[in-house]
Image (tube, rainbow, N blue to C red):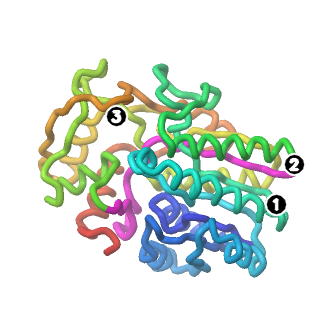
Amino acid sequence: MAILVTGGAGYIGSHTCIELLEAGYEIIVVDNFSNSNQESLKRVMEITGASMKIYNISLLNTTELEKVFKRNNIEAVIHFAGLKAVGESVKSPLFYYKNNIIGSINLFELMQKYLVKRLVFSSSATVYGNQEIVPISEDFPLSATNPYGRTKLMIEEILRDLILSDENWCISILRYFNPIGAHKSGCIGEDPRGIPNNLMPYISQVAVGKLKELNVFGNDYSTHDGTGVRDYIHVVDLAIGHLQALKKVMSETGINAYNLGTGRGYSVLELVNAFEKASGKEIPYNICNRRFGDIAICFADTKKAKNELGWEATRGIKEMCADTWRWQINNLNGFN
């Protein structure tokens, strides 16, 4: 019996594949490599010494996707596949709705047809919108401020409707906060295409001289140093969270959402300072105006994941920065 991992070549997917293989699972990866690189999966197999089946398929291609279900004895699915850039989603909303939502529906229909009713879904803390109260718990009201976030929210609603129609499903929805870091080997990590959208890869590219300086959006928030505070979680801790969620869906029915974060926040300047210590490099930065929609502080309430999944993050900011730097310095141009 195998675990199907959609989007397994991506940043979080590839790290989760390592944890799955090292835990003894047989895995099958489906990815169209539109925003990932097949080299990541090659390195996953080198790190683990294990093999896996890899299919270059889009979830929009139901004919080819169904062949995967026909040819393999799939027991459960971890669903990462999807477009994820907020700015791009604002510019191309139909592209995002088609890819993320229709692709997911195609997957869920085939799961239902082939009686594969155990699912771990990769959601996001973006489904909470702009909350002014912290820590954010799973029972907070849900909303979204951009098309990317709305695709995640819509898929969550689809899954809740699905389980109302068929109580044999078991679904874990994982809401990530801010994944950073890389595998300790330095062989896989975050490999954004073009100029990074996220803070940590931007900082690391400044450190190696690929980018001139970091833009810090606002230093007048009501925080200890005036810069925005976010909950950063090591990607390996996040990957381990998927294993714990997988164990849960294999043993019971129902649907649950879980925050995956550390339960504490770090400011932009704290992250910069921690990265300077890890890398020995100065990170020049420029203070800019706030971005519309940004809030001062955002971090997770993680009690539910600890109580029900037996999971909590164990890696701190020092390790997150050191692992990111090891990945960056050994892979100046990412997987290329």
Q: State which region is magenta.
A: 168-193
Residue 63 lies left or right of residue 112; in this view the side is left
Question: Picture quarter containing residue 211?
Answer: bottom left
- State which tag comes first along the sequence, 3 or 2: 2
Q: Does residue 233 appear in the picture of this structure? A: no
Secondary structure under tag 2 reads: loop
Type of amino acid under label 2: Asp
Left or right: 58 as drawn, with respect to 67 = left
Does residue 45 appear left or right of residue 189 in this picture? right
Circle 1 residue: 112
Q: Position of residue 250 (x, y in %)?
A: 77, 56
> How many neighbours does mark 3 have within 10 angstroms: few (below 14), some (14-19), or many (20 or more)?
some
Q: CA distance from mark 3 to mark 2?
A: 42 Å
Q: Secondary structure at mark 1?
A: helix
Which residue in the structure is indicated by mark 3? Answer: 266
Q: Decide: marks 1, 2 in contact (CB < 8 A)?
A: yes
Horizontal and vertical percent position of residue 195: 27, 56
- Relative placement, left or right, of 217 versus 309 is left
Disc 3 marks a residue whose amino acid type is Tyr
Q: Earlier in the sequence, mark 1 or mark 2?
A: 1
Q: How many marks?
A: 3
Q: Quadrant of the C terminus?
A: bottom left
CA distance separating discs 1 and 2: 10 Å
Residue 208: give its label: none
Q: Is residue 6 above or below residue 97?
A: below
Quarter holding residue 16: bottom right
Mark with earlier residue (3, 1)? 1
For the stretch drawn in magenta, the main secondary structure is: loop
Rendering coords of residue 70 (x, y %): 78, 78
Nearest to the eye among marks 3 and 2: give it: 2
What residue does disc 2 label?
A: 166
Q: Residues within 10 Å of mark 1 (few under 14, many from 20)?
A: some
